[in-house]
Image (cartoon, rainbow, N blue to C red):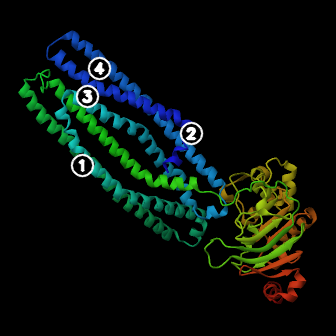
Amino acid sequence: MIKRLAACIREFKKPSLLTSVTVSLEVVMEVLIPYITASLIDKGIEQANMPVILKYGIILVVSAFLVMLFGFLAAKYAATASAGLARNLRHDMYYNIQNFSFTNIDKYSTGGIVTRLTTDVNNVTMAYQMIIRMAVRSPMMIIWSFVFAARISLKLSLIFFITLPVLAAALLLIMKFAHPLFQRVFKTYDKLNEVVEEDLRGIRVVKSFTREETEKQKFGAISNRIYSDFTRAEKILALNNPVMQGCMYATVLVLAWFGAKVIAQSGGNGDIAGGLSVGQLTSLITYASQILTSLMMVSMAFVMITMSKASAERVVEILNEKSDIVNPESPLYEVKDGSVEFENVSFSYSKDADKKCLDNVNVKIDSGETVGIIGGTGSSKSTFVSLIPRLYDVLSGSVKVGGEDVRNYDITTLRDNVAMVLQKNELFSGTIKENLRWGNPNASDEELERVSRLACADEFIQTFPEKYDTLIDQGGANVSGGQKQRLCIARALLKKPKILILDDSTSAVDTRTDALIRKAFREEIPHTTKFIIAQRISSVQDADKIIVLDDGKISACGNHEYLMENSEVYREVYNSQVKGGDKE
């Protein structure tokens, strides 16, 4: 985990290293100050020697200035390094997410990914900033303070070691009990984000069913779980401060007590063997404070690491996730035509699943054919077409496009030749032009208008005051469902694909518009292979082939007349929709 996170530092290694250097120089100057202060007291103040006072006073002022300078530089470099790490982590995570296959995406919730990109990254970078400063400063301060304290009085310096086992035991216990709670807190954060996102997306449904109070209670319950777990974790962490303070004050008291006795016995003369002066005792107490303060900083770093450990694990999980769909060693960069063939294809979303979504599917579609796909809910219609652009890989068998297994193609090449309008249509913030140009960034205005006319979208776009420069709200909130579907179809057509897949993409348009779109397809893009998933028989009735899916298997395949004679499932659907409607 540490190695994976460290790899994201990259160009910010220099400020990270400079942080350690400047912190080291800051520590050296801080440790020298008590030693200089002892000489100032013993040789200057007690002997009323003004030149000595001025000499050591100037040295102290210069030392203090250098401490401030190195401290400022250390803070500056640490902030740069931690902010850079945060940027690289988010960059690497987001870019890796973009490479995920649908299988990878299915493993994580949207709320969970958002939490990892925000809260978890913040926790990791805060811990990193503390580590590159405190992990250098505290050990160095402890070591050098003890070295200088031992030079003054080795026996009294040994008092520091009494507190170390107590502090170490306290820190280990705090980490042991706090870490599981923070793991649970961040998982609950995922759920909270999911609830908020779900409510905001479905706010119209919530209000239409007057479910505001129910949603408030759901949010409140999750929020209270976070509050409860976080409070318990913080209570454990809160023990850190009193333990540290108790050890610090106890050490200073013991040091002052024994130091005073030594001073009294030696008459305040630090030059005699075993003696101790007032200035030296002052320095010892200062070194004791520095050592214990450094230990407190170490404990704070442990607290931050405890909090961030759960976050780091979640961040690394995203960074290490590898797409299960990758390019072959020598990919093909040209799709010959739009022919599609399924050979003994079986598929399941889970490799361990007992039941397959598609089982031993065989079908061949020639280039330029229009293929209708119908079937009941859960019959795997969307799954069937998702295998063509290799959004998922088959468990067994093969899917061929242009006579080649889809696994032999360069992924970008394959998907550029297969345009898919998904069941759930998505538009993005920006103008209509910007949304359409997802299909072809270099498309001219004339091309935009042509595909919009094919998709019957131009007729409503022309009614907007800004026409193609009309702004689309996030998710296409300011256009109707049918308008959104037509814009998505136009966007797909702009790719000039060899294969066009419409996954129930005209369900929100009226039958007249649906018929006009299909007519435009036949006349304007006759050489494009078209797959039309629909619930309405009228949407697929004129197709060259109609595939009837039932429970993950092809129960029948043929044109309308053939299926009316040979498929009971198709005949039942037709009678319920068309014949029944005529009777009414």
Say which label, 1 or 3, has the lower sequence index.
3
The residue mark sitting in front, 4 or 1, is 1
Say which label, 2 or 4, has the lower sequence index.
2
For the residue pair 411 and 384, the one nearer the viewer reads as 411
Amino acid on which the number 1 mark rests in the picture: Val
Amino acid on which the number 4 mark rests in the picture: Leu
Say which label, 3 or 4, has the lower sequence index.
4
The residue mark sitting in front, 3 or 4, is 3
Quadrant, the C terminus: bottom right
Q: CA distance from mark 3 to mark 4?
A: 17 Å
Where residue 267 sits: x, y (%)?
7, 23
Q: Report the disc number at residue 543.
A: none
Give the residue number, with chain letter if any, for mark 1: 166
Q: Report the disc number at residue 60.
A: 4
The residue mark sitting in front, 3 or 2, is 3
Say which label, 4 or 1, has the lower sequence index.
4
Give the residue number, with chain letter if any, for mark 2: 10
Say which label, 3 or 2, has the lower sequence index.
2
Residue 535 in view? no
The residue mark sitting in front, 2 or 4, is 2
Q: Residue at x 53, y 71 (%)?
A: 211
91 w.r.t. 39: above or below: below
Residue 303 in view? yes
Q: Report the disc number at residue 148.
A: 3
Crowd tier of the residue under label 3, counting other residues whose Cα lies within 10 Å: few below 14, some 14–19, many 20 or above: some
Where residue 129 sits: x, y (%)?
44, 40
Where residue 372 sits: x, y (%)?
83, 74
Where residue 213 sits: x, y (%)?
48, 69
Say which label, 2 or 1, has the lower sequence index.
2
